[in-house]
Amino acid sequence: MSGVLQLLRSVLTRGFVRSDQANEYIVLALGSDVGHDEAMGANAGQSGAAVQRRLGAGARDLILDAAAELFTDLGYAGTSTRAIADAVGIRQPSLYNYFKTKEDIACALLNQTVTPTLDLIPHLLGTTPTGHLHALAVFDGGRLINRRWNLGTLYLQPELRSPGLSPFWQGHDRLRWHYLNLSQSVLAETEIGRAAAELPFRMVESLVFMWDTEPGPDRDDLPTQVADACLRVLGVEESHIARIRATSHELLDRYAASQSAT
């Protein structure tokens, strides 16, 4: 138990956001020899299709990347759609060809933090509750800590509780309840109090506080360490965890292979 407490203490004393990120997306796809007005389609009334041709098929992703950096650096409330458009190198009206509101942008970004994990769940059905929970925690934790921008910290911003973000929060709640049900299934076989069922989901989400950890093997292993800790707080015996971990990694390797094949 002292190891779990030490891990949580370490997690909670870390900062949120890297300080060395730089803008990398300003009209790179347009080429340095293209003038800004010409490249951006500055003429009034230019269609969204023309902007798409100027920016290429990745225009939506460029907008999301710019918004992710600004939201995590300046906060959601401190970021305007004009600032996002300026960062990408397009005019503000052109941005609305892709997203109607700032809430739509935030919702699309935040969905990236839960949708892949929800998509994994059907592939884990039929696994033991401990193996299922461990694999879920490893995958989910890896998605949170290995993203280009620390989107998980946006969960903490009260402005993002607005009705326009409800599609994301509904998915987030579905994921939370899945963790809870799995944890309760594990607790049915141990002597730990039922209140502990809330801990695994919170422990995995706490990895956002470790996002700025120096890249390397120790950082890469953090999702697995947290998944192991999730089992420990639910009362799973230490002698069983290595076997569960191996099974979990096999499940995730097969899932990754199946996704690569499609």
Image (cartoon, rainbow, N blue to C red):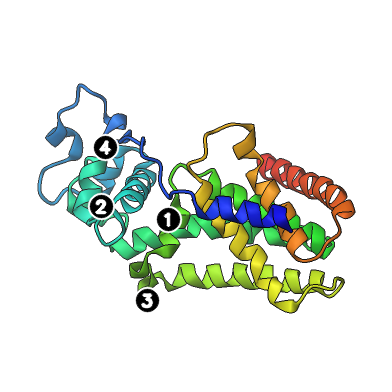
Question: Could you tell me if residue 100 is visible in this image?
Answer: no
Among the 4 quarters of the image, the one containing residue 165:
bottom left
Residue position for label 1: 109
**Helix or strand or loop: what does disc 4 sit on?**
helix
Indicate which disc, 4 or 2, sits on the residue closer to the N terminus.
4
- Seen from the viewer's position, the closer of residues 163 and 42 is 163
Q: Which mark is residue 95?
A: 2
The reply to whether the C-beta atoms of the residues labelled 2 and 1 are less than 8 Å apart is no
Q: Earlier in the sequence, mark 1 or mark 3?
A: 1
- What separation in Å lies between label 3 and label 4 (alpha carbons)? 34 Å
* Residue 183 located left or right of residue 73: right
Task: Look at label 1 and name its amino acid.
Answer: Leu
In the picture, the quarter occupied by the C terminus is: top right
| Residue placed most toward the observer, 45 or 148 | 148
Which numbered tag is attached to residue 163?
3
Q: Residue at x 19, y 39 (%)?
A: 40
Say which residue appears at 71% left-offset and 56% top-offset: 2
Name above or below for residue 83 compared with residue 217: below
The quarter in which the N terminus is drawn is bottom right
The amino acid marked with disc number 4 is Arg
Choose top left, top right, bottom left or bottom right for residue 237.
Answer: bottom right
What is the three-letter code of the residue carrying label 3? Pro
Mark 1–mark 4 Cα distance, whole angstroms, equals 23 Å
Which residue in the rendered view is the most extreme toward the left? 44
Packing grade of label 1 (10 A; few <14, some 14-19, many >=20) is some
SS at mark 2 in the image? helix
Instruction: Name the residue carrying label 4.
Output: 54
